[in-house]
Image (cartoon, helix red, strand yellow):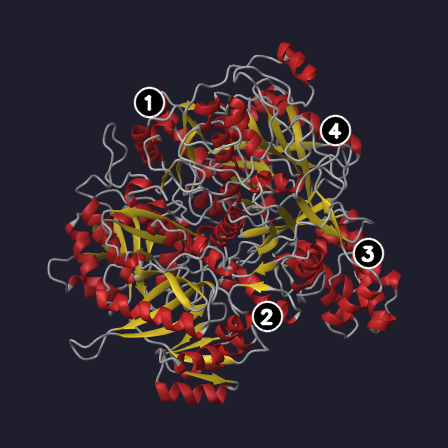
């Protein structure tokens, strides 16, 4: 095994052996206090992000250069910046993934942790997001799964006593916590130094008033604005500025609470909502239609400042940059405008005193040189992750090194390895980012995109023309899209073009293809720069040329090459000439047209690049690499969306690292800029590429790979597994034929019947009549389940015949090639998750987690408890036997997941029934959770099973009794999705997850619930609004417990009022409840001090005036805790009863550390 493949990480510090800082850079260092710990097994550790030519003395600032003379000279002339004397540093993470704050902070935090490890600094991390790579012990020496709030961070500081704290790697959450800790005086009292950008700079960049003043001091134009703290002040400010205005919230993320107002009525509503989420809002002149640009800036303590990347929004100002299509580098700026904004960026960042990385956003008048600064993020942001992946410049890593006192000339360029980090990247390719929205999953959601962000993820495509990278990106967003086509046909086309929605790009396609709009017409309606529109016209003209050819044989070399250089996929070409993908592929290869593999080299080939960061293009004439490594391909998870998020990135990274540890070369394919898997030091080769059949085949054939792993990237790789096998690709692990039989509900059910594993009654139907007949036979409710879906798309529970026809047609349209399966839905049954690993059909490892909610809530939205809280030893054994039967029947080699229903027996004393409702022959979203809670890495075992190398012996880790409980809670983004009904059903709605440990289920649930972003504890003796279905048995105990704890009960319905007041010793007051006037309702909530809403409705709101819907929606809009499930609400009040006597509702108190403040290692009794 080549030593270059991995670094050895052991339980001793190499610097003690070698005595040189030079060598500490080569290892992930364990702190000296661990010297007596037992030796840990050898682990694969990603190569250091940058190399080092070595410094003999840590305090000496030396140019990073292979020339000894240059290093000697630089030691004399480079400024002597004192390095902070820190041996232990706390990094504040960002918490659960939500709209506006997603996977980019897993990536940036992970890079910062790598940098700290190289410096020999002990890293302590607080982040409740158990699904992320950064919360693995490979990076931090201690991890705390606790809320990212000022109180809990203060407790960890009190307990760990670090020397420094890093606040700029955890998004807005971490920044706000840092500012609050400074105000509380905790940092000064404990002697904790803020590393990198100082607190005062963070405050100035976040407080809009201070920010405007600071920029006026250096004559940099800022949008005319006024900071206000009340609705009346907002109205008077707008009168002075003149409508339309934009309202922005301070101290919030992703434009939360911001928007445009064209008149006083709109502003009154908007400001009332925004001021409930933020203490201050800014009223600004609206510059809708101007160009929006961003510059990523890096500055060190010696004032060396560079522009890493500049980016241009395809959409003009008015759309939040997170919801815009973005290109890098900018395409429409003349040189003088580029340099005007570059100079302004350097001036602003120096004046504000940023140390590390930040981004600056501009509005630029397209008809003049007038510009103004919109905002500065003095932290790593989503744009930073995009810029980092677009350029190959490791921004987060460099920012962390700068925070530790390094200067840019000392650090080497991560990509070229021969120049220093103070070279500005120069690109010979173009990158396009397109956001991913999941708005179709929600009812009542406005599809328009504006200044508040709504997208859940993003893709990044690399090409050598705009057309190539745009069409690549379109396919990455949704595998059903083949390229630039009219996927929508708006009735009011001009409105769809002038008011952007999540589908505007395809409205442009409809305008061009179907309505013959000209570039000038489109520019007038959209204000999108004509340069982009002319490029899109090139795609349109190529579509016409392909259609004119008429058949695949008529496409000659010139037309095929033109189409491929424009980014057309084989399947898109096949559609246009009525052929099929394989025929087009064969014809293209017969013409000698195949893609070329190019390196990301950041300096446009001025210096030789040695990176493994690759992309494919048809706009080239030679390969940049030799294909002599024959690695194992790992297919990543693609774009983050509801149902597939950071947990699959954890699986892919873990798998790639395990392969390297076993001596295998690795090839990672993924296109998500927010991920750790797309960091170029995580695999031997990284292809920043599409995950469709065509591209995977291209790379497999070029690399002559050992095989392909499809079971760690979620549903996307699974969907092409069978086609890969049919194309003679060696798919490692479980046979794709078996994967297909588990995905196809009909085949799956037949196999379960054959092995005697119970399941709910089911039937395969192809007509509404057959469905009605089945439902009448088994009785309602029934569940409609299409095949090959992710996160329950188009699954519906139907309670009556009238709803059956509509739901069946909706489900069938998702997977028209597969028949629909209809099953009996079992009400009030318990749901259980079984995560497992098998090898050649033999069970190796399994975990059993219990849902708090009853069946009917999607497992991705459910609250998971591990170890289970109510299953008997006999039931645990029966579940294990089911897992063994399934592993054997499907001949599984690798990971799999089952969802099982537990139906209590009808007869007292009889055994409960277990029925399997689903089985995925891949890693599931709960794999990181079970791995970290049980202290056993399931993906390590699964990787060994997939490749059949060093396969461990079977072990029953569930048999071990544990003195702790962990609870995983879903993170929802209802606040972002105006109008959406915060109701849980079989369709998944959550965007992320958090988890916490506790001595019992109540403590773990309490801590994990507090860990969800934006959760505010109700103050003692405040009001609780209760509503919903009075038939729920939990309603009585919830009301009684809350009253006993001193809370006041309110309701809006006379039915609920009568029910509550008939409970002995319970009294509840019915309040005036305006359903259509948000401002009046807010006043009612304030009048009665309502600080929590419990709504146990049976079904979604019928309309926007449904009383329960109004209660749920406004709880979210007013930033109040909402409990919308009876079992969870019951657990919440039990947790309150347990934590209130322990001071759970009190704030931070010096010297008091709550019992839940323990590190991951302390909970599980070892360091995994």
Residues packed near mark 1 inside 10 Å, few (<14), some (14 to 19) or many (20 plus): some
**Circles 3 and 4 in contact, beta carbons < 8 Å:** no
Question: Distance of mark 2 from mark 1, alpha carbons?
Answer: 58 Å
Q: Secondary structure at mark 2?
A: helix
Query: Does the image show residue 944?
Result: yes
Q: Could you say which is closer to the camera, residue 189 or residue 451?
A: 189
Question: Distance of mark 3 from mark 1, alpha carbons?
Answer: 62 Å
User: Sequence-wise, which precedes: disc 3 or disc 1?
Assistant: 1
Q: Could you say which is closer to the camera, residue 479 or residue 957?
A: 957
Q: Which mark is residue 722?
A: 2
User: Sequence-wise, which precedes: disc 4 or disc 2?
Assistant: 4
- On the image, the x and y values in percent for residue 302 come to 59, 17
Residues packed near mark 2 inside 10 Å, few (<14), some (14 to 19) or many (20 plus): some
**Labels 2, 1: front one:** 2
**Circles 3 and 2 in contact, beta carbons < 8 Å:** no
Q: Write down the residue under mark 4.
A: 339
- On the image, the x and y values in percent for residue 956 come to 31, 59
Q: Write down the residue under mark 3.
A: 538
Quadrant containing the C terminus is: top left
**Circles 2 and 1 in contact, beta carbons < 8 Å:** no
- On the image, the x and y values in percent for residue 1042 come to 20, 52
Residues packed near mark 3 inside 10 Å, few (<14), some (14 to 19) or many (20 plus): few
Q: Residue at x 32, y 31 (%)?
A: 36
Q: Residue at x 50, y 43 (%)?
A: 44
Query: In which quadrant of the rendered view does residue 924 lie?
Result: bottom left
């Amino acid at each position: 095994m080549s030593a270059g493949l991995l670094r050895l990480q052991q339980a001793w510090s190499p610097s003690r052996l070698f005595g040189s800082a030079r060598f500490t850079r080569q290892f992930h260092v364990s702190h000296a206090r661990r010297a007596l710990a037992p030796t840990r097994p050898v682990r694969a550790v990603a190569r250091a992000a940058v190399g080092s030519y070595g410094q003999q003395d840590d305090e000496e600032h030396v140019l990073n250069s292979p020339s000894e003379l240059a290093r000697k000279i630089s030691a004399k002339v480079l400024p002597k910046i004192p390095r902070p004397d820190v041996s232990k540093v706390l990094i504040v993470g960002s918490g659960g993934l939500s709209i506006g704050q997603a996977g980019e902070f897993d990536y940036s935090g992970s890079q910062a942790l790598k940098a700290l490890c190289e410096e020999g600094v002990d890293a302590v991390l607080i982040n409740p997001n158990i699904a992320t790579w950064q919360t693995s012990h490979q990076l931090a020496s201690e991890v705390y799964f606790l809320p990212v709030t000022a109180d809990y961070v203060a407790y960890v500081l009190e307990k760990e006593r670090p020397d420094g704290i890093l606040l700029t790697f955890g998004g807005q959450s971490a920044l706000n916590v840092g500012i609050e800790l400074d105000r509380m005086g905790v940092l000064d009292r404990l002697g904790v130094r803020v590393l990198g950008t100082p607190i005062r700079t963070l405050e100035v960049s976040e407080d809009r008033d201070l920010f405007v003043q600071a920029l006026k001091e250096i004559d940099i134009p800022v949008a005319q604005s006024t900071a206000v703290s009340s609705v009346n002040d907002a109205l008077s400010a707008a009168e002075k500025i003149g409508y339309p205005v934009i309202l922005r919230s301070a101290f919030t993320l992703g434009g939360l609470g911001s928007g445009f107002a064209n008149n006083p009525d709109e502003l009154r509503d908007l400001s009332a909502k925004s001021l409930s989420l933020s203490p201050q809002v800014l009223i600004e002149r609206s510059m809708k239609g101007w160009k929006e640009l961003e510059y990523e800036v890096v500055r060190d303590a010696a004032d060396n400042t560079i522009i890493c990347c500049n980016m241009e929004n395809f959409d003009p100002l008015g759309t939040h940059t997170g919801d815009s299509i973005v290109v890098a580098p900018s395409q429409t700026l003349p040189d003088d405008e580029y340099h005007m904004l570059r100079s302004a960026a350097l001036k602003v960042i120096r004046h504000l005193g940023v140390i590390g990385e930040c981004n600056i956003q501009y509005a630029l008048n397209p008809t003049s040189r007038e510009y103004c600064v919109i905002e500065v993020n003095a932290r790593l942001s989503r744009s930073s992750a995009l810029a980092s992946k677009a350029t190959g410049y490791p921004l987060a890593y460099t920012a962390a090194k700068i925070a530790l006192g390094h200067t840019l000339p000392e650090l080497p360029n991560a990509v070229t390895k021969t120049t220093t980090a103070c070279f500005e990247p120069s690109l010979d390719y173009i990158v396009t980012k397109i956001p991913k929205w999941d708005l179709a999953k929600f009812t009542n959601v406005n599809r328009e995109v504006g200044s508040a962000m709504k997208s859940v993820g993003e893709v990044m495509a690399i090409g050598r023309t705009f057309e190539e990278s745009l069409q690549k990106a379109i396919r990455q967003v949704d595998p059903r899209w083949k390229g630039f086509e009219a996927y929508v046909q708006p009735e009011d086309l001009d409105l769809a073009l002038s008011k952007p929605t999540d589908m505007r790009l395809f409205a442009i396609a409809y305008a061009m293809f179907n309505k013959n709009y000209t570039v000038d017409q489109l520019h007038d309606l959209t204000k999108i720069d004509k340069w982009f529109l002319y490029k899109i016209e090139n795609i349109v003209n190529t579509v016409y040329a392909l259609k004119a050819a008429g058949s695949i044989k008529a496409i000659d070399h010139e037309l095929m090459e033109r189409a491929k250089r424009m980014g057309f996929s084989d399947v898109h070409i096949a559609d246009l000439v009525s052929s099929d993908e394989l025929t087009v592929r064969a014809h293209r290869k017969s013409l000698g047209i195949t893609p070329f593999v190019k390196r990301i080299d950041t300096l446009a080939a001025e210096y030789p690049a040695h990176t493994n960061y690759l992309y494919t293009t048809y706009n080239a004439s030679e390969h940049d690499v030799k294909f002599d490594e024959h690695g194992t391909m790992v297919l990543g998870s693609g774009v983050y969306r509801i149902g597939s998020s950071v947990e699959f990135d954890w699986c892919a990274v873990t798998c790639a690292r395990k392969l390297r540890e076993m001596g295998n070369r690795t090839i990672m394919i993924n296109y998500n800029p927010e991920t750790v898997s797309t960091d170029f030091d995580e695999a031997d080769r990284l292809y920043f590429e599409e995950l469709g059949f065509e591209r995977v085949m291209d790379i497999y054939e070029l690399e002559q790979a050992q095989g392909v792993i499809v079971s760690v990237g979620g549903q996307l790789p699974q969907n092409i597994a069978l086609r890969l096998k049919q194309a003679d690709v060696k798919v490692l692990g479980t046979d794709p034929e078996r994967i297909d039989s588990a995905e196809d509900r009909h085949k799956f059910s037949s196999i379960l019947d054959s092995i005697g594993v119970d399941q709910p009654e089911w039937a395969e139907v192809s007509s509404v009549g057959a469905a009605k007949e089945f439902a009448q036979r088994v009785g309602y409710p029934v569940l409609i389940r299409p095949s090959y879906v992710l996160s329950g798309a188009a699954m519906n529970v139907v309670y009556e015949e009238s709803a059956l026809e509509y739901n069946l047609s909706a489900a069938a349209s998702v997977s028209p090639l597969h028949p629909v399966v209809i099953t009996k839905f079992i009400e009030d049954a318990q749901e259980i998750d079984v995560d497992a690993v098998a090898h050649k059909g033999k069970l190796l490892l399994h975990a059993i987690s219990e849902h708090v909610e009853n069946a009917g809530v999607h497992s991705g939205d459910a609250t998971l408890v591990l170890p289970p809280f109510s299953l008997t030893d006999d039931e645990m054994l029966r579940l294990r036997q089911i897992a063994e039967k399934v592993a054997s029947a499907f001949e599984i080699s690798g990971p799999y997941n089952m969802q099982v229903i537990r139906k209590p027996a009808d007869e007292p004393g009889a055994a409960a029934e277990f029925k399997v409702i689903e089985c995925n022959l891949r890693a599931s979203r709960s794999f990181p959770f079970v791995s970290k809670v049980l202290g056993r890495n399931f993906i390590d075992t699964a990787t060994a099973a997939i490749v059949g190398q060093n396969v461990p012996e079977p072990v029953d880790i569930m048999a071990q009794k544990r003195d702790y409980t962990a609870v995983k809670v879903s993170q929802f983004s209802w606040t972002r999705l105006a109008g959406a009904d915060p109701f849980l059903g079989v369709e998944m709605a959550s965007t992320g997850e958090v988890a916490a440990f506790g001595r019992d289920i109540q403590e773990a649930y309490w801590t994990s619930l507090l860990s969800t972003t934006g959760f505010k504890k109700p103050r003692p003796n405040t009001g609780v609004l209760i509503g919903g279905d009075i038939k729920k048995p939990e309603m009585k105990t919830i009301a009684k417990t809350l009253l006993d704890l001193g809370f006041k009960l309110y309701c809006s319905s006379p039915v609920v009022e009568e029910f509550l007041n008939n409970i002995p010793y319970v009294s509840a007051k019915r309040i005036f409840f305006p359903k259509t006037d948000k401002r009046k309702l807010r006043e009612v909530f304030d009048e009665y001090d309502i600080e929590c809403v419990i709504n146990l409705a049976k079904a979604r709101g019928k309309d926007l005036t449904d009383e329960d819907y109004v209660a749920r929606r406004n709880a979210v809009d007013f930033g109040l805790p909402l409990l919308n499930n009876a079992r969870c609400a019951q657990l919440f009040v039990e947790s309150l009863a347990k934590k209130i006597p322990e001071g759970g509702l009190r704030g931070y108190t010096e010297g008091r550390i709550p019992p839940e403040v323990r590190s991951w290692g302390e909970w599980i009794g070892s360091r995994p």
